[in-house]
Amino acid sequence: MTGLIKRIEKMDFGKLDREITIQEGTESTNDDGDNVTDWSDFAEVWASRQMISMDERYLGEKLTLTEAYKYRCRYVEGVTTNMRLVDDNEGGGTYDIVAADPVGRKTFLELRVIAKD
């Protein structure tokens, strides 16, 4: 138990400065027969954010920008890569979750995300 306490004490909780929402989607069909995803809130947590990469590429004649971030928050059970992350803070946006990895003994959750088109 002492090792776990030391690990928790090393995390600077003041860096969890962004309130984010993790959402889960439910697939349905609209009146036109198109598949749509309805999003509902799964969890609201405080997190830190770190940019992993930013990449510009041409797809055909269109320039696309891909942004990847790492968010770290207190552990939340049940988060999957079928969910998305919404960051309404300045510079935030809506992101696809591409990895959700527990840190330590499920003390924290590290979310790797990419910006949605």
Image (cartoon, rainbow, N blue to C red):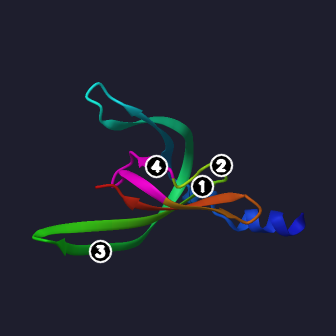
- Measured from the top left, where is residue 62 in percent x and y? 13, 67
* Residue type beneath disc 3: Asp
First in residue order: circle 1 vs circle 4:
1
Reading the image, the residue beneath label 3 is 55
* Residue type beneath disc 2: Val
Local secondary structure at mark 3: strand
The residue stretch that appears in magenta? 82-97
Question: Which label is found at residue 84?
Answer: 4
Q: Do the residues labelled 4 and 3 touch (CB within 8 Å)?
A: no
Task: Please identify, in this view, whether the residue under mark 2 or under mark 4 is nearer the observer.
Answer: 4
- Label 1 vs label 3: CA separation? 25 Å
| Quarter that holds the C terminus | bottom left
Reading the image, the residue beneath label 1 is 73
- Label 1 vs label 4: CA separation? 15 Å
Q: Is residue 63 left or right of residue 108?
A: left
Reading the image, the residue beneath label 2 is 76
First in residue order: circle 4 vs circle 3:
3
Which residue is most to the front?
Answer: 33
First in residue order: circle 1 vs circle 3:
3
Query: Quick check: is 69 in the magenta stretch?
Result: no
